[in-house]
Image (tube, rainbow, N blue to C red):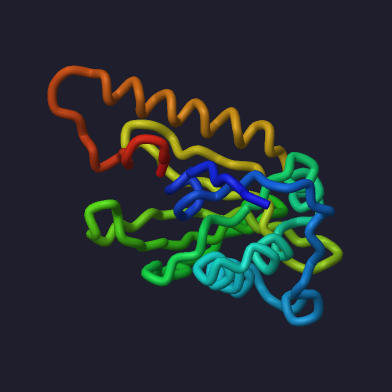
Amino acid sequence: MKRSRVSLTALVCAGLLSFGCQQSPQQDTTAGSSSLLGPEQLVTEFLQAVRAGDDDKAGGLLTPLARKKTSEMEMVVAPPGSETAKFKVLSSENVGEDVHVSSDWTDLDTDGRPHTDRIVWIVRKNAEGWRIAGMSTRVFADQEPIVLNFEDPADMLRKQQQAEDEIARRDKQPGPTDRSSEVPSGTVR
């Protein structure tokens, strides 16, 4: 069955959400080994799965609620794989009961030049161990970062639409535009 991807480039590494056939909630296909991982190691495993295009493994590393809610909306929280992508997990910080894990995701832009996005992954501990509940990234240099709660897909879609609308608005403004904080039409970073 054909699946279309909704691009959210820097909102999640290069196009986070896909829509497709109704699927049963993704199971934690990494049970066992991933239940022993700390937050930084979990993000490393998630980003390796994303880079490889392994939607099932990436989805299995989300919180159970995120897996359930995204499945109900026929969404997969993983961008298309990319052989040219590289990532680096930088640091982590306790924020309440969550841990925020910073990372850099570098891939080639539409002109073939490397482009790096800073993404902060929101990691939460539950019965399965540490799991990813969401992420945040700065889409526009002059605005606050956008926080995507994977446990609330409807809100993620609203935020994506707002970012796409802002890109369109900025593209219509006369004069030079700071394109360093924007990506080609239809994508948000």
Picture residue at 80% right of the left edge, 42% below the top: 72
Residue 132 in the image: state x and y as whole percent. Answer: 67, 58
Which residue appears farthest toward the left when viewing the image?
A: 175
Q: In the figure, is residue 33 to the left or right of 102?
A: right
Residue 88 in the image: state x and y as whole percent. Answer: 43, 70
Count of numbered tags? 0
Instruction: Examine the rendered structure and indicate whether residue 183 appears above or below residue 39.
Output: above
Q: In the figure, is residue 133 to the left or right of 158?
A: right
Residue 23 in the image: state x and y as whole percent. Answer: 79, 52
Which residue appears farthest toward the bottom when viewing the image?
A: 33
Q: Nearer the viewer, residue 177 or 126?
A: 177
Picture residue at 43% right of the left edge, 24% below the top: 165
Q: In the figure, is residue 123 to the left or right of 11?
A: right
Q: Nearer the viewer, residue 44 or 91?
A: 44
Picture residue at 23% right of the left edge, 59% below the top: 113
Q: Nearer the viewer, residue 98 or 146?
A: 146
Picture residue at 76% right of the left edge, 61% below the top: 125
Q: In the figure, is residue 111 to the left or right of 36?
A: left
Residue 25 in the image: state x and y as whole percent. Answer: 82, 54
Instruction: Examine the rendered structure and indicate whether residue 144 appears above or below residue 189.
Output: above
Quarter of the image containing the C terminus?
A: top left
Instruction: Examine the rendered structure and indicate whether residue 12 appears above or below residue 60.
Output: above
Instruction: Examine the rendered structure and indicate whether residue 50 appears above or below residue 160.
Output: below
Which residue appears farthest toward the front when viewing the image?
A: 1
